[in-house]
Image (cartoon, rainbow, N blue to C red):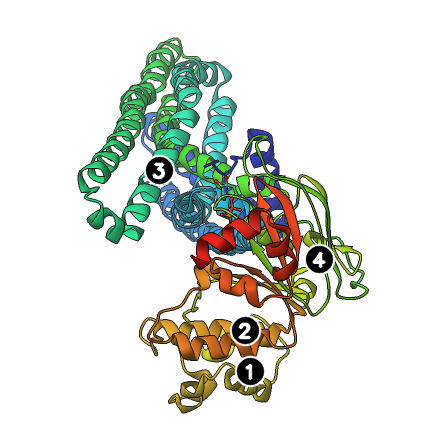
Amino acid sequence: MTELPVAGRAHVRRAVAGLIRDDRGAVAQMVLFNALAAIAGLAGPWLLGRIIDTVTAGPAPVGVVDRLALAVLLCTIVQIILARTALAVGYRFGERTAARVRERFLDRALALPASVVERVPAGDLTARGTVDVGTVAATLRDAIPEVLIAAVQALFVLVAVFLLDPLLGAVALLGLAGIPVVTRWYLRRARTAYLEEGAAGSVLADELASTIAGTRTVEALGLRDRRTAVADEAIHRARHTRLRTLSLRSVLFPAVDVSYVVPVVGVLLVGGALYIDGRLSLGAVAACALYLRQLAVPLDAILVWLEQLQSSGASFARVEGLAAIPPAVVTERAAPAGDRIEVRGVRYAYEGDRDVLRGVDLTVRPGERLALVGPSGAGKSTLGRLLTGVDRPRAGSLTVGGVEISRLPPGLLRRQVVLVTQEHHVFRDAVRDNLTLAAPDATDDELISALAVVGADWATDLPDGLDTRLGGDGFVLDGAQAQQLALARVVLADPHTVVLDEATALLDPTTARDAERALAAVLHDRTVIAIAHRLQTAHDADRVAVMDGGRLVELGTHDDLVAAGGTYANLWRTWHG
Ligand code: ADP
C-alpha cells in the first residue's frame, strides 16, 4: 500500500500565507489592537521608574506620586481591554480559518480518484481528517492569536529598553542570545520527530481499524496472536516516537527558563554600574529590569506555542498533502454519441509494471448480454473496473459513444455504465438521500417507482416514508433490503450498460429468488457485461468473452465456442461433468 503524500515546507508556507490573505481584515485588526495593548503595557514600568526617580530626587509632593500611580492603574486597565479585544478578534479569525481548512480537506478527500482511495490505507486518510485537521484547527484558534500578541509585545518591550538606554538594550539582547540557539537546535530535530509521531499514529489507527474490520477472519483463522503482535509493534513505535518528541522538549524548556534570567542579571549589573557612575537614573534601571522581567511572559508564550506550531506544522503538511494528488480527470464535457463501448489495446497495471491486462480489444454491442469468463486472476474484474471508469488504462482506450470513459464527469458517467457488486453501502441518512445520490434531480414519485421496480415494498411502509433515517439509531436494513436499495440507485441512475460482478453479487440463498427478480428487473433493457462465475450465465448470454492471463483469448456465442473446442469448450465440459 502506498501512503498519502505529505506537503513540502514551501507548499505549507504558501498555504498558511493563503489562509492569512483570505482573512486579512481580521489579521490587520488583530495586529492593531495588539500594538495598542503593548504600548499601554509599556507605560507601567516607565511610570514606576518615574515614581522611583521622583522619590529619590528628594521629598516629593504626595499628589505627584499618587497621580503617577493612578496612571499606572489606568494603563493596566486599558491594556487588558485592548488585549481582550485583540484576542476575541483572533479567536474569531481562528475559528473561521479552521472551518475553511476542514471544508477544503473534505472537498479534496471527496475529489480523490477512486483508484487512489482504494490504494492508500484507510487509517491514514481518517487520521488526517480527524487528528491532523483537529490539531491544525486548535492551533489556528489558540496558538496563532496568542503568538501574534506575544510577538508584538516582545518587540515593543525590547524597543522600550533600547529607547531608555541603548547600552542596556544591547546587554539585554546579548543575554537573550541563548534562546535562538537552543530553539534552532530544537526546531532542526522537531519537524522530523513530529512527522514520525504522526505517521506512527496513522499506522496504529490503521492496524486497529483493520483488526476490528476483520474480527471474524481473525477469530476464524486463529490470527489473534499475530494481530496482537502487529498491534504491539505499532503501539511500540507510537510510544517510541512520542518519547523522542518529549525528550526534545525536556531540553528546550529548562534551557529557555534559564535564558530569561540572564538578561535581567546583565541589565542589573551594567545598569548598577552606570547608576553609580551617575550616567543613568535609578528609575531607568528599574524600568529596564521590569521590562525584561515582563519579556518572559510573551517569550514563554511563543516557546510554548512553538512546540504546538511544530506539531501542527507537521499536521498541516499531512492535511495539505492531499493537494499533491491530481484529482480524477474529468475534462470531457462532450456527451457520448451513442451507447457503443469500444475497448482498444488496453493495458493496465496495479503496481509497478506488471501488466494484469495485456492488450485487450473488445466491442460491446448495445443491448447485448456479454459474459466474461476465465480462470481466477485472468483480469475480468480489472476490466470491469476500467469499463466503469474507476481508473484509467496505462495504454489503449475504453470509450463509450466515442468518449473516453474515465474522462466522463460523474453525473454523465453514471448514465452510461454502472458497476453492480455485493457492496451495498447504506448511508446513515434519509431513504431519499440514499437514493438521490444516483439521481440528484429525481422527484419523490420517481424514487418510489424505482423502489417498486426492485420490489422494495417495505420502503413505502416506513414510518416517515422517504424521510425515514437509515442505519444507526434509525431503521436498520437487512442484507436483502440493502441490496434492493442499491439496485434502486441503479434504476435511478438509468445507465444503458451495467457491469455485473457475479462473484460478489451472489446472493443469500434465502432471499435469492426475490433478489434475482429484482436484479432481472434492473438489467431489463440494458446492455449487460456479466463477470460470470457460474457458467450457466455464460450459457444464457448472447456472447461469451474468454479471458486468460490478461488477454481476450476467445469471443463468440456459447454454441460456437463449444463447437470450436478451445478453452471455453474445456471449461464447459469440466463444469457440466
Ligand atoms: P479476475 O477477476 O479474473 O479473477 P482480477 O482482475 O481480479 O482477475 O485480477 C487480475 C490480476 O490483478 C491478478 O493477478 C490479481 O492478483 C491482480 N490484482 C487484482 N486486484 C488488485 C489490486 N487491488 N492490487 C494489486 N493487484 C491486483
Residue where numbered disc 1 is placed: 450
Mark 1 vs mark 3: give the one in front. Answer: 1
| Label 4 residue SS | loop
Q: Quadrant of the N terminus?
A: top left
How many marks do you count on the picture? Answer: 4
Q: Which residue appears at 49% of the width and 78% of the height? A: 518
Amino acid carrying label 2: it is: Arg
> Observer-nearest residue: 98 or 342?
342
Q: Quadrant of residue 459?
A: bottom left
Residue where numbered disc 3 is placed: 203
Position in image of residue 365 (x %, y %): 73, 63
Q: Earlier in the sequence, mark 1 or mark 3?
A: 3
Q: Quadrant of residue 249?
A: top left
Q: Which residue appears at 42% of the width and 80% of the height? A: 514
> Pointer 1 and pointer 3: residues touching (CB < 8 Å)?
no
Residue where numbered disc 2 is placed: 489
Residue where numbered disc 4 is placed: 408
Mark 4 vs mark 1: give the one in front. Answer: 1
Q: Earlier in the sequence, mark 2 or mark 3?
A: 3
| Mark 4 sits near ligand 1, with its Cβ under 8 Å away | no
| Label 1 residue SS | helix
Amino acid carrying label 1: it is: Ala
Q: Which residue appears at 64% of the width and 49% of the height? A: 554
> Pointer 1 and pointer 2: residues touching (CB < 8 Å)?
yes
- Cα gap from disc 2 to disc 3, whole angstroms: 35 Å
> Observer-nearest residue: 151 or 115?
115
| Label 3 residue SS | helix
Query: Is residue 33 visible in the rendered structure shown here?
Result: no
